[in-house]
Image (cartoon, grey):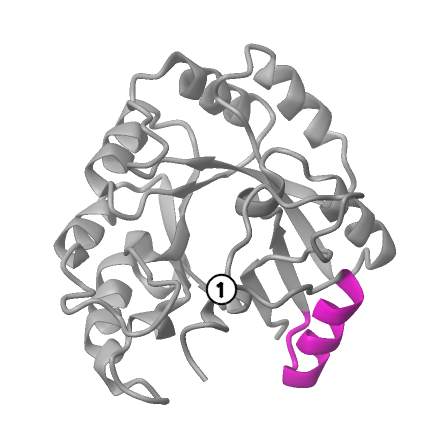
């Protein structure tokens, strides 16, 4: 059975050639070659390469370069811009890109997007037209994410990171699973699946993180294993767990 990581970020060092938009507390670089080596060390056959919004915003050119160099190891997801009136054309072009399997939107509170945003409507209609699932980050804003899913029943959604706010530095928040009831309710939307990615960062105990397994079991029960995608997001988890 092939083991696929549903969430990795691959990126070059922050240089004038390809500058980062923000500087997260991640490793200084995890290039395509370095990610493949890391996958090989632990027996991961392939990964969904999510072009890093925090670093590159809507520019997925590095992802395309890496997939070209390692075509059997990565499939690609590109963030798309609701404020771009030509975003449907961007998605049409992305469909022609070798290895492209999806797009991504941000529905966090920081993004400030209303579920009725016409730019989101353009994106989600295009996702149906070009048969792309939409990866959605809605942690800390699950109600808005649910409303968007309900508004677009023909669109396939992939919920990022359990829809649970995850820390960038330890420790986990005092009540890391406060939004779990909302996440379980999301499972009623049959046009959505969920990434169980970065879950270890929600633990307040050392490996093997015994305090996360009861809430995760509730996720598995609500969603069903066939709608749960395992993922590491290890470049972010790197700063949180050993």
Residue at point 61%, 33% (across, down): 58
- The residue at which mark 1 appears reads as 236
Image quadrant of residue 74?
bottom right
Quadrant in the picture for the N terminus: bottom right
Circle 1 — which element?
Answer: helix
Q: Residue at x 60, y 72 (%)?
A: 3
Camera-nearest residue between 234 and 193 = 234
Image check: 150 left or right of 200? left
Q: Image height check: is 74 above or below 36?
A: above
The relative height of residue 55 versus residue 114 in the rendered view (above or below) is: below
Q: Position of residue 102 (x, y in %)?
A: 58, 40
Residue 116 counted in the magenta span: no
Examine the image and state in which quarter residue 145 appears: top left
On the image, the x and y values in percent for residue 142 come to 23, 42
How packed mark 1 is, by other alpha carbons closer than 10 Å (few <14, some 14-19, many 20 or more), is many
Q: Position of residue 8 (x, y in %)?
A: 58, 60
In the image, residue 93 sits, relative to residue 174, either above or below, namely: above
Please, which residue is most extreme toward the front here? 16
Per the picture, the main secondary structure of the magenta-coloured stretch is helix
Quadrant, the C terminus: bottom left
Residue stretch in magenta: 32-45
The vertical placement of 27 against 136, above or below, is below
């Amino acid at each position: 059975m092939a083991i696929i990581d549903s969430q990795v970020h691959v990126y070059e060092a922050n240089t004038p050639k390809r500058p980062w938009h923000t500087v997260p507390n991640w490793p200084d670089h995890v290039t395509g070659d370095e990610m493949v080596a890391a996958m090989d060390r632990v027996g991961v056959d392939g990964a969904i390469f999510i072009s890093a919004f925090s670093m590159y915003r809507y520019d997925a050119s590095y992802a395309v370069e890496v997939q070209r160099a390692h075509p059997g190891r990565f499939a690609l997801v590109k963030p798309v811009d609701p404020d771009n009136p030509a975003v449907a054309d961007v998605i049409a072009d992305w469909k022609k890109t070798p290895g492209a399997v999806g797009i991504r939107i941000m529905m966090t509170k920081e993004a400030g997007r209303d579920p009725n945003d016409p730019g989101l409507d353009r994106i989600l209609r295009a996702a149906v037209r070009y048969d792309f699932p939409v990866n959605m980050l809605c942690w800390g804003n699950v109600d808005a994410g649910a409303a968007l899913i309900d508004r677009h029943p023909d669109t396939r959604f992939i919920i990022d990171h359990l829809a649970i706010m995850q820390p960038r530095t330890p420790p986990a928040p005092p009540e890391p699973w406060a939004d779990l009831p909302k996440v379980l309710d999301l499972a009623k939307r049959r046009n959505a699946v969920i990434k169980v990615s970065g879950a270890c960062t929600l633990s307040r105990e050392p490996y093997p993180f015994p305090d996360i397994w009861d809430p995760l079991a509730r996720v598995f029960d609500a969603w069903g294993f066939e709608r749960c995608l395992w993922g590491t997001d290890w470049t972010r988890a790197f700063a949180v767990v050993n």
